[in-house]
Image (cartoon, rainbow, N blue to C red):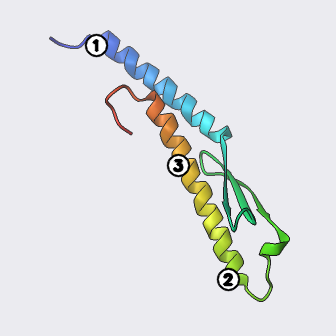
Amino acid sequence: MQPDMNQLMQAVAKAQQDMAKAQQELTTATVEGQAGGGAVRVTCTGDFQFKSIKIKPEAIDAGDPGMLEDLLLTAVNDAANKAKEVGARKMQAIMPPGMGF
């Protein structure tokens, strides 16, 4: 039995609409990464547009700039990983049953 081409085309069109909607939602979804118990916080959107970096004064040590660099790197990676998770959840929600993302 051959699949109904009309139904297949409708399913493809719906998947494209759902994908476009999910991509739009990712541009407004925000996540926050942090390091040093919140001494450094980085905010970015689900499509990896970094919006802000907040640094508490106690994280700034002029004698040890490497520590702040490490905190910033950790916070950025934390935010990026959270953004990836948000994107994966959105994509998984629109995938047909049995199709992994």
User: Is the C-beta separation of discs 1 and 2 under 8 Å?
Assistant: no
Q: Which residue is mark 1?
A: 5
- Side (left or right) of 45 relative to 7: right
Is the N terminus in the top left, top right, bottom left or bottom right quadrant? top left
- Side (left or right) of 47 relative to 94: right
Q: Which label lies toward us, 3 or 1? A: 3
Residue pushed farthest front?
Answer: 37
User: Is the C-beta separation of discs 3 and 1 under 8 Å?
Assistant: no
Density class for disc 2 (Cα within 10 Å; few <14, some 14-19, many ≥20) is: few
Q: In which quarter of the view is residue 12 placed?
A: top left
Q: Amino acid at mark 1?
A: Met
Determine the residue positioned at 31% across, 29% down.
98
Q: Which residue is mark 2?
A: 66
For label 2, the SS is: helix
Q: Which mark is residue 84?
A: 3
Determine the residue positioned at 37% across, 25% down.
96
Q: Amino acid at mark 3?
A: Lys
**Residue 31 place in picture, x, y as percent:** 66, 48
